[in-house]
């Protein structure tokens, strides 16, 4: 046999090298690999963009530190007003008194000695104040000047 035939026979039976295998694999599957990598990168970028957008729009939770007041029932004015009009001397006496706890006094706002909130006299919470703890105010300014705050259930 000639040397040329021997060389051809050796190359036919010779195993392909690693670089030849990689080259052959890349030629066969390269476009599919690039497509898969592109899809994975797009999915990764989309996920990150959504996550960052959600973090940007994240709001602080609302924390309620005080229980809400129940809505105040609407109560008619005191029915004793007609009986008070019959006795003008008693009306004058109640107006001149400086005692804030008198029941005869007309109160624009009511508070408790044990609280820092003032209410409308028709509020259900105002009706629960014990008479010995009840304080009357003729105006909001008077109540606030004494350090009381409006109750959110009945004063808007």
Image (tube, helix red, strand yellow):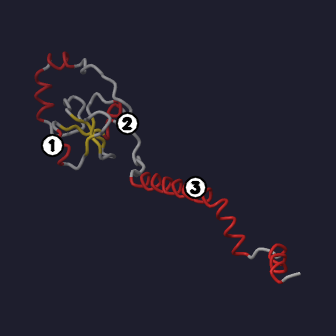
Q: Nearer the viewer, mark 1 or mark 3?
A: 3
Q: Secondary structure at mark 3?
A: helix
In the figure, 150 relative to 42: above or below? above
Q: Nearer the viewer, mark 1 or mark 2?
A: 2
Position in image of residue 149 (x %, y %): 25, 45
Q: Mark 1 = which residue? A: 141
Q: Secondary structure at mark 1?
A: helix
Q: Would you say 127 lies left or right of 82 here?
A: right
Q: Would you say 22 lies left or right of 127 here?
A: right
Position in image of residue 90 (x %, y %): 15, 25
Q: Nearer the viewer, residue 25 or 53?
A: 25
Callout 2 environment at 10 Å: few (<14), some (14 to 19), or many (20+)?
A: few
Q: Spatial distance from mark 1 to mark 3, Cα to Cα?
A: 74 Å
Residue displayed at 15% across by 40% down: 98
In the figure, 94 relative to 47: above or below? above
Q: Are marks 1 and 2 in contact (CB under 8 Å)?
A: no
Badge number at residue 35: 3
Q: Would you say 54 lies left or right of 108 here?
A: right
Position in image of residue 18 (x %, y %): 73, 75
Residue displayed at 19% across by 29% down: 106
Callout 1 environment at 10 Å: few (<14), some (14 to 19), or many (20+)?
A: few
Q: Are marks 1 and 3 in contact (CB under 8 Å)?
A: no
Q: Spatial distance from mark 1 to mark 2, Cα to Cα?
A: 22 Å
Q: Secondary structure at mark 2?
A: loop
Q: Quadrant of the C terminus?
A: top left
Specify the quadrant of the image occupied by residue 86.
top left
Q: Mark 2 = which residue? A: 69
């Amino acid at each position: 046999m000639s040397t040329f035939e021997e060389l051809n026979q050796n190359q036919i039976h010779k195993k392909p090298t690693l670089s030849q295998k990689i080259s052959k694999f890349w030629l066969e599957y390269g476009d599919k690999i690039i497509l898969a990598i592109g899809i994975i990168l797009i999915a990764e970028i989309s996920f990150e963009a959504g996550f960052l957008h959600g973090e940007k729009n994240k709001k602080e939770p609302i924390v309620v530190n005080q229980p809400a007041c129940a809505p105040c029932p609407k109560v008619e004015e005191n029915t004793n007003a007609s009986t008070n009009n019959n006795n003008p001397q008693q009306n004058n006496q109640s107006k001149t008194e400086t005692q804030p706890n008198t029941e005869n006094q007309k109160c624009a706002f009511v508070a408790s000695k044990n609280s820092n909130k003032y209410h409308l006299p028709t509020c259900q919470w105002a009706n629960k104040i014990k008479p010995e703890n009840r304080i009357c105010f003729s105006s909001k300014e008077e109540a606030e000047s004494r350090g009381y705050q409006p109750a959110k259930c009945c004063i808007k």
